[in-house]
Amino acid sequence: MTIDIAKTIYSGKIKDLTLGKGDKTVIIGGESCYPFYLSEGEMPHKPIVAMEVYDSPPEDWAEAATEPFSDVINSPVDWAKKCIVEYNAEMIALQLVSTDPNGLNRGAVEAAEVVRNVADAVGDIPIIVWGTANKEKDTEVLRKVCELCEGKKLILGPIEEGNHKKLGASAIGYHHTVIASSPIDINLAKQLNILMGNLGVPDEQIIIDPTVSSIGYGIEYSYSVMERIRIAALTQQDERLQFPIICNLGKEAWKIKEAKMPTDDNLGDARKRGILIEAISAAVLLLSGGDVIIMRHPEAVNLIRDIIDEMTM
């Protein structure tokens, strides 16, 4: 007896987005089905893992997260190179934590020079540049990054409604991709994409950041919003939500208390625990529609690469 399995009919498709330049460009998006539902449609491009690099030495990381980068932690250029050479990173996510006004408050010119040095060192590997979510400081810093890194085709964020005009204009002028960031709300995500379009940012230069979190710390809210974005994009023909999704996960997974607590009889080995928290969180976000996942620990990265390969065979 033949059993007909019901299948979802998709009327929409996620836009293709090319990140970077030259021989190392990465193409994301293009899905015509829900994540990994390959019996119903296509995922022509596998999700990509980007590895974190910080522009200043982190002071509050768990030992397990610091250990793989202990020899390069004072040099973002060497750190980025190590991610590429030793851990086969396809993308680098440079976190500009030093520009935080509540921290080192590094100036825009100095921060932009760090970005340019990293970009020069890694060649054509696509680079994500992530600010501190302080609208005023990010506007100042990322505009200078746009200028000094003209032609590098960076991916810049977070760009929010409060600073989208200035940063969107800079991205257009210097040919960079924008990360449209909204606080876990499908309507706000759509509205920001509309504003970007009205400003003149081409669709092929927009990627959605819905804001994400780790398991145990609200990941169900991120999952729900990402899922609704995909449903609207693929089955409701909502063109302003048909963009790839980026998830800045590494810093969220490793800042939770369970990732930093020491080894004990109840929670087990601290190193293994932190790696699994990050990897499991990444798997959840992939299942809800993530196209680019920013991660930290090389072993967590390898676990997720294996999962992606298995799910797309």
Image (cartoon, helix red, strand yellow):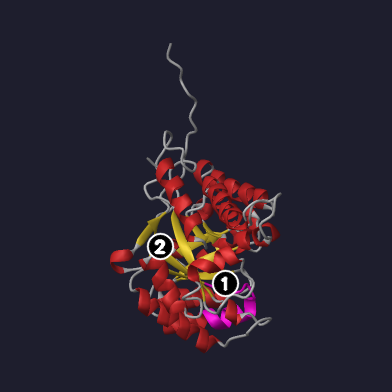
Q: How far apart are marks 1 and 2 (CA)?
A: 34 Å
- Which residue carries the number 2 mark? 87
68 or 161: nearer the viewer: 68
Point out residue 35 in the picture as x, y percentages from the top left corner: 49, 43
Seen from the viewer's position, the closer of residues 122 and 182 is 122
Q: What residue type is labelled 1?
A: His
In this view, the residue in front, 30 or 188, is 30
Q: What kind of secondary structure does the magenta stretch mostly adopt?
A: helix
The 10 Å Cα crowd at callout 2, few under 14, some 14 to 19, many 20 or more, is some
Q: Does the magenta stretch include residue 87?
A: no
Q: Are marks 1 and 2 in contact (CB under 8 Å)?
A: no
Tell me if I can see residue 195 in this picture.
no
In which quadrant is the C terminus drawn?
Answer: top left
Label 1: state its secondary structure.
Answer: helix
Give neighbour class at mark 1: few <14, some 14-19, many 20+ (Cα, 10 Å).
Answer: many
Q: Which mark lies nearer to you, 1 or 2? A: 2
Above or below, 293 relative to 83: above
Quarter of the figure with the N terminus:
top left
Q: In this view, does 70 lie above or below 1?
A: below
Dot 2: element: loop
Under mark 2, the amino acid is Tyr
Would you say 34 lies left or right of 228 here? Answer: left
Q: On screen, 305 above or below 135?
A: above
Say whether residue 101 is visible.
yes
**Which residue range is magenta in the image?**
130-142
Q: Does the magenta stretch include residue 132?
A: yes
Image spot of residue 189 (x, y percent): 60, 58
Q: Which mark is residue 164?
A: 1
Which sits earlier in the primary sequence, circle 1 or circle 2?
2
